[in-house]
Amino acid sequence: MYMASGKGDVGGASISQLGTYQDGGVNHHNNPINIALWESRYIWPSVVRPDVVLSLGTGYEETGQSPVVMTPKVKFPWSFSFSVRETPLHRLIQSFKGSMDGQSTWRELMNHIHEDEKRDYFRLTLELPGPEPAIDDYGAMELLSSAVRLQPRGPEARRNVLMALLISSFYFELHEIPTYNNGMYYCNGAIRCRSSGALRSLLNVHPLGDLEFFNGRTSLGAFLSDRDLCKSCRRYQKTVHFFVKSLEDEISLCLKWSVDQTRNISAMPRRVSWFIDRQGLDMPFGAAAICDPPSVTCKVCTLSEQVPALEREPLRRPKRKLEAQSIEDERREPKPPVWTIEPLRPKRKLSPVREEDERPRKKLERIYGQV
């Protein structure tokens, strides 16, 4: 975007074979936020809602005075002057100044954004303590620098922007098509990160390890840690499981680091069917377009993704139930001691054996007499 170098340079810049370019701010685009949103829809047509929108301002003058009070007067070289208040020329000047105000463009944009999406839009600018300095006023640099440091909400705003940019580096992908069982769809997937540097930076901001993954308000039992980095390719992968009633249900995977501090990861919220179509899991021959390039393909990550997690869950639950039930039975009904039964068994077995041994001897004495 061409910027005029001085007050008198308003004719634009001529470039051979391309044409003449004018200052973009003169044509109602001093704040190019609308152009950026329009171009993003053409670059990523499938993205309906951007993860993070960041606008950088150069400062603005916030005043409560009426425009009528601040109306300038037109002076001539001779002895008189007149006010242009409430004249067509005054309205033209105010309209031109309004088109150059980047802060008013931001306010108009926020009036069209839904309340749930406003937390994804950030603007870092400066509320000037006085009138806006000229574009070529080099003496105002020290004043602007001190105003940035003394801004009350400056550190908090910069921290929120940092958290939003880092968390937007995480995304979710399914390992396989969700399986249907007992009226619920079981989803097996993983949370990945586009850059291991973003993971380390996020852990530096929160060194206590209190970052936990949630699906809406339901905890996934997974915490953010650098131990989930693959030892072979150094890419992040955290396996997560959850259930949905329908493939058209929306999931909202997010990171939570406080009681009321949560932020969605990239491309959230989305329907489960969107991930199936995006990854081509329902295609009969698979989708080669979503596979990783050969330079980043890792056999260790691929093997860990193929481990079925659905078969392990039924084996764990009955075991925990049986252990709990056996402990309760031992408390309620203690087992009888063994010694109350075992001593009686030998006496019952020995008494009939002695009688059977004496019968043949008595019969022989009657026949042959006493030997």
Image: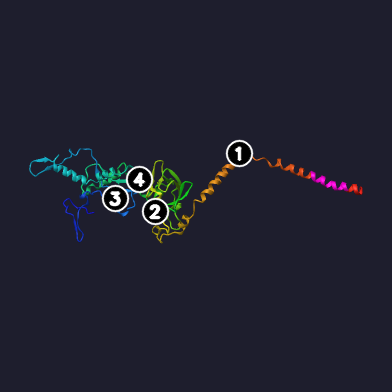
Range covered by the magenta-colored residues: 351-363
Quarter occupied by residue 343 = top right
Reading the image, the residue beneath label 4 is: 160
The amino acid pointed to by label 1 is Arg
Counting other residues with Cα less than 10 Å from the Cα at mark 1, is it few (<14), some (14-19), or many (20 or more)?
Answer: few
Q: Is 78 a magenta residue?
A: no
Q: Please state the horizontal and vertical placement of residue 221, each as a whole percent of the image.
A: 46, 46
In the rendered image, which quarter contains the N terminus? bottom left
Q: Which residue is mark 2?
A: 277
Q: Residues within 10 Å of mark 4 (few under 14, many from 20)?
A: few
Q: Is residue 318 left or right of residue 348?
A: left
Q: Amino acid at mark 3?
A: Leu
Nearest to N terminus: mark 4 or mark 1: 4
Q: Amino acid at mark 4?
A: Asn
The mark nearer the N terminus, 3 or 4, is 3
Q: Is residue 193 visible?
A: no
Residue at screen point 53% across, 46% down: 317
> Could you say whether the residue bearing mark 3 is in a helix, strand or loop?
helix
Residue at which label 1 appears: 331
